[in-house]
Image (cartoon, rainbow, N blue to C red):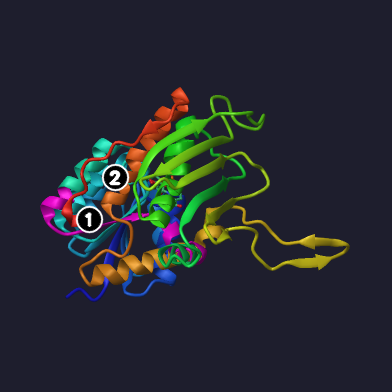
Amino acid sequence: MTKTLRIAVIGAGRMGADHIQRLNTRIHGAEVAAVVDVDLARAQAAIEGIPGAVALADADEALSNGDVNAVLIATPGFLHEDILLKAIAKDIPILCEKPLTPDAETSWKIVEAEQKLGHKRIQVGFMRRFDAEYAALGKIIRNSELGELLMLHHQHRNPTTPAGFTNEMLINDSVVHEFDAIRYFTGEEITSVQVRLGKATRNAPAGQHDPQHVLIETESGVLADVEIYVNAKFGYEVATQASFEDGIVSIGGDQGPYTRSNGRWGGTITPGFEERFGAAYDVEIQSWVDAALRGEIGGPTAWDGYATAACCEAGVEAQKNGEKVAVKLNAKPDLYR
Ligand SMILES: NC(=O)c1ccc[n+]([C@@H]2O[C@H](COP(=O)([O-])OP(=O)(O)OC[C@H]3O[C@@H](n4cnc5c(N)ncnc54)[C@H](O)[C@@H]3O)[C@@H](O)[C@H]2O)c1
């Protein structure tokens, strides 16, 4: 049995570099064996100080390296499909950053390839499930501690967006996290998505309508809404308020320390996702490693990746027509039941 994962990290950009650091310093049972980036200098910089790691410019080279027995994919989403299919063919543990792939059709191909393999090898990087507050709210819902869950209100606010962040990316790159969170909280599939475009901020780049209000319905009729606001300036905030029959639960609001000084009160706001979800990423990757060493996966599946891709497709259509768009899903294969 494998005692240590020797991981090839594909893509050493913002997310990949962050994962390389955590694998090298905080995660047990795993080592970085190779870092691949088309920008070889970036891969070389990322392996600095990591004994035994090699820098490569080609993912195929890493996958055929006998020293590699697992892969973490952190390239842009449109490149995931090709690497996923090759890694599935090698039957090695895979952590794929979200999205699984950018659309439902290619995500379904991945689900089919994993089914042929006959066991789960892919964990998708929806890290919010590993955030302590998300887990606590999930437990309250599953145990019916406050009766039935009725509604979920989400706020997803970023200070600004990188150049080239399109209108569709508000759904595909941002609200995709809420699609997964709503499925995780309710344990149900999402049945429809509607997007309302109201008054927009002058701070959005051309072609991007910001903020947007996304209205979501699940199988049992739980209603959820998301304020996605990606040029909110003040900082990064991901918060949820859940309405139950017997109470209200809020998570993700401002966190301590709460200070009173010089006639003012308050605290600091997290500037980005690394700070807000840093601990969750650690738990996520450790869960993947621990499960992979047992021959399992430790988090969201390829089915979750496929289902959220289908929600995103409905969301992008809803952005364009303003209508309530049904989410179309194939039947769930037994492997994911
Ligand atoms: N879970 C989260 O909260 C979260 C947050 C940010 C990004 N992401 C996801 O992580 C992934 C990477 O995003 P990012 O922000 O790090 O992007 P990035 O652009 O910062 O990094 C991508 C890296 O991939 C490299 N690359 C491009 N083509 C390649 C190829 N063919 N082979 C090898 N390397 C290649 C680029 O040179 C770059 O270094 C995306 O899927 C994104 O959606 C997830």
Whether residue 318 appears in magenta in the rendering, the answer is no
Q: Hey, what amino acid is under mark 1?
A: Tyr
123 within the magenta span:
yes
Image position, residue 228 (x, y; %)? 55, 41
Residue 324 position within the rendered picture, expressed as x and y whole percent measured from the top left: 43, 30
In terms of depth relative to the viewer, which is nearer, 337 or 132?
A: 337
At 61% from the left and 39% from the top, the residue drawn is 231
Q: Residue at x 23, y 61 (%)?
A: 93
Query: Where does the image place residue 159, in percent across and percent down from the top left?
Result: 62, 44
Q: Residue furthest right?
A: 263
Picture quarter with the N terminus: bottom left
| Magenta segment | 113-135
Q: Residues within 10 Å of mark 2 (few under 14, many from 20)?
A: many
Residue 314 visible in the current orientation = yes
Name the residue that disc number 2 marks: 306
Question: Label 1, on which residue?
Answer: 336
Residue 198: quadrant of the picture: top right
- State the quadrant of the C terminus: bottom left
Q: In the image, is 246 to the left or to the right of 193?
A: right
Q: Is residue 275 left or right of residue 121?
A: right
State if disc 2 and disc 1 touch (CB < 8 Å): no
The amino acid type of the residue labelled 2 equals Tyr
Q: Nearer the viewer, mark 1 or mark 2?
A: 1
